[in-house]
Amino acid sequence: MKIEKILNFDNTYDINLTKDGKTLTILFSRVLDLYMVIEDGVIMPFRTSRTIDFDINTQDKEVYELFDKLYNDVINGNIFEKNKNSKSIDSSLICSYNLLVDENKNIIWVSDDGIFEDMDRMQISKINDAYRITFVRTDKMSDLEFKSPKRIYIRLRTSGSRYDPFHIPFMRMYKSLQNIDEKEIEENDSKVKKELKISYLK
């Protein structure tokens, strides 16, 4: 995985994670909401549905660790990092939690724009020792929604979201990504590939 940090308008970084020909961008926008955006270079015709998967596994080192923490914080309802050992979801979170987490422990965030049924969505699933982030473009479009022909945007409102306050673990992950050394990630990735190559040659 390659990680790239691009300086944003407020001295934070947009985070680009590139792997297998796909780029996952995590950014904090001028409207003060978090966005998760996927792009794979394919042009999507107007009003067509599409699904793009982005996988993060243990070889992705620090990025994997941050997504692992995000997933577990959401699944366990650990919003403010005060109830790490709790075995039940706080009653004040139940409604938002039931909208966000399905019976198979998948996190499904429907973009906070326009009409719920029309919106694009993002699913985070744990598959063995990996996380799969699935972006789904619907073939519907409302007057309040912008859909790029090249990217799928998921808006995570920091205020007024149907999933409030579950944006907080996502913001926590974004802030942690700010501190990752992009060179270190690339060096780790190259080291893993080198080790795999040596193992294969043996």
Image (spheres, helix red, strand yellow):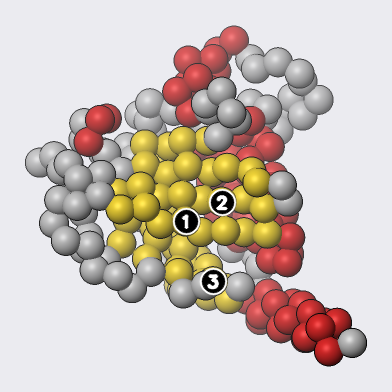
Would you name the residue on which mark 2 appears? 132
Identify the residue at the far top of this view.
Answer: 91
Asked whether, in this view, residue 107 is left or right of residue 49, the answer is right
Q: Quadrant of the C terminus?
A: bottom right
Where residue 23 sits in the image (x, y, percent)? 45, 68
Question: For the residue marked with disc 3, what is the amino acid?
Answer: Lys
Q: Out of 100 and 173, give the one closest to the viewer.
A: 100
Amino acid type of the residue tagged 2 in the rendering: Arg
Q: Residue at x 58, y 76 (%)?
A: 2
Residue 202 shows in this picture: yes
- In terms of sequence position, does the residue under pointer 1 or pointer 3 come before the other? 3
Specify the quadrant of the image occupied by residue 174.
bottom right
The residue at 47%/42% (across/down) is 123
Disc 3 marks which residue? 19
Q: Which amino acid, mark 1?
A: Asp
Quarter holding the N terminus is bottom right
Q: Which mark is residue 53?
A: 1
